[in-house]
Image: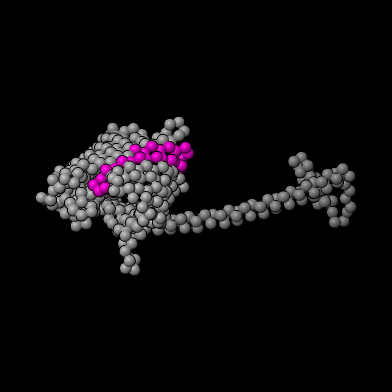
Amino acid sequence: MKIKQLSLGMLMSISVLMAGNGFAGEQITVDKDEYEQLKAAVKFLMSEREENQQAVQEAKQAAEEAAASAKVATENAEEATEVAEAAAEAAESPILEGLQNLSIGGYGEVHYNNLNAEDDSRDLDEFDIHRFVLFFGYQFTDNLRFFSEFEIEHGGVESDGDPLGGEVEIEQAYIEYDFNEHTSALGGVFLLPIGILNETHEPDTFYGVERNNVESVITPATWWAVGSKLTHIFDAGFKLEAAVHSGLEIPTSGGSAFRVRSGRQKASNADGSHVAYTGAATYTGIQGLEVGLALQHQDDASQTGGDGLDDGFLYAAHLAYDGNIGNLGVGLRAYYAEWDFDGDAVEAADDDEQKGWYIEPSIKPVENIGFFFRYEDVEGARDQDEFDQWTLGANYWLHEHVVLKVDYQDREHDQDSEEDRDFKGYNLGIGWSF
C-alpha cells in the first residue's frame, strides 16, 4: 500500500514538472532511486489491473452460471408443479379411487406323492397342482368390506372333454360390517370357525405337504357354508363367534353312508330345510398361543326326516403354540374333534360316534428351516377312514410366504379288511401365498 501511494505521488510530481518546465523541449533528469521506485510502481499498477480484469471476468462467468442454474431450477419447479397437478387430478379419478380400495391375494401348492401300498394296485406316484386360489376384496368404507376366495383344485374340471377330477369353487364371498372396533357381523359364504386349519390354511402356515387327516375326515376342512356370523373381540384376548348357516346333508346309503365329508353342501343350491348353529371361543392373550373351542348342532344332519339319521353335535378343541426356548424355535399343535349322531340307522351302522385327534410338535433350529412330527388317530364312518398315521418331515421357507416341503408318511388301518390300503411313502411340495 505504501509503494502504491509513493508511486502515485511521484507520478503527480513528474507531471507537474513536465507541465511547468516545458517538457516538449527540455530533458528531465530523475534520481536513480526514484526511477527504480517509479518503475516498481508502474509494474505494480499493471499487475493490479490484470488481477482486476480477471476478477471481473470470473464474476461475470459466475453470474452467467448462476443465471443458467436459476433457469433450470425454474423449469424443474414448473415441471414438478405440472406433475403434482396431474397426480392430484388422477387421485380424484373414480377409477383410481376404486383400484385403491381393491385388494388381491391368493395361494397355491404343487405336490408330488410317492406312496407304496400293501396292494400294489393302490400305489400312488403322481404330480398335482393341488390348489390354485385367488382372493379378491373391496373396501367400501372404513367399516364395510367385501371378501371372496376363488379356488381351482387339481388343475381344473375338464380339458378337451376329458375330466381332470378337479373342482372350481367359491369358498368365500361375504360382506362384513364393523359396528365398532370390537364387534362385527358378516353375511354370505364364509369358512366356519372350527379347528386350526379351516380358516387359516395357506401352505406356508402349516407343516406337511398334505393337510392333516383329522381336519379332513372328522371336521371336513375346507368347510364353508351360507349364512351369517357375529364376532366380538374382548381386550383380554378372548374372541366369541356365533353363526347360523346352511347345514350338512350327510348321505345315509351307499359307499359314503354317514360320512361327514360327503355331507358338505358347498353353498351350491344347499338344502335349507335344517340349518346348523356354530359357536366358537378363542383365546390369544399370550403371545404365540392360541386355544380354541367350537360347538355345532344340526337337528337333522341328512336334511331328510325318517331316514335314520337325526341330529348331530360336534365338539372340537385345539391348541396351537409358536414361540422360542432360548434361540430355538418351538411349536406345538394339538386337536380333538368328535361327532355324536342320533338315529336308528346311524347307530345300527356303529357310526353314531366319529372322532379323531392329532398332536404335532415342531422345532426351528434356524429362522427359515423347521422339522416336525405328527401322529394322528382317525375314526371315521367308513372302514377306510379308520387308521393311525405318523408323518415326519421338514419345511424350508425361501421367503416368509414361499415354502418347500418334504415328509415321510406311514399309515395303518384299524380294520383287517383295509390292510391292503396301508402305505408308506414320501411327499414333496412347494407352496406360496401373497
Q: State the extent of the magenta-drawn residues as a range.
A: 359-384
- Considering depth in this image, is 71 or 125 the residue closer to the camera? 125
Residue drawn at (89%, 48%) of the image: 29
- Considering depth in this image, is 29 or 406 the residue closer to the camera? 406
- Considering depth in this image, is 154 or 232 the residue closer to the camera? 154
Question: Is residue 29 left or right of 9 when viewed as pictured?
Answer: right
Residue drawn at (31%, 36%) of the image: 319
Q: Residue furthest top?
A: 326
Question: Is residue 306 left or right of 241 when viewed as pictured?
Answer: left
Quarter of the image that includes the N terminus: top right
Residue drawn at (43%, 58%) of the image: 82
User: Residue 95 appears at what percent x and percent y?
Assistant: 33, 59
Q: Main secondary structure of the magenta part?
A: strand
What colouring method underlies this structural image? one colour
Question: Is residue 149 left or right of 85 when viewed as pictured?
Answer: left
User: Residue 328 appears at what percent x and percent y?
Assistant: 45, 34
Q: Quadrant of residue 98?
A: bottom left
Magenta span contains residue 317: no
- Can residue 273 be seen in the rendering of this structure? no
User: Residue 325 appears at what percent x and percent y?
Assistant: 43, 31
Q: Quadrant of residue 333?
A: top left
- Can residue 23 be seen in the rendering of this structure? yes
Q: How many marks?
A: 0
Magenta span contains residue 365: yes
- Considering depth in this image, is 7 or 375 the residue closer to the camera? 375
Q: Residue furthest left?
A: 306
| 63 in relation to 240, above or below | below
Residue drawn at (37%, 48%) of the image: 423
Q: Residue furthest bottom?
A: 160
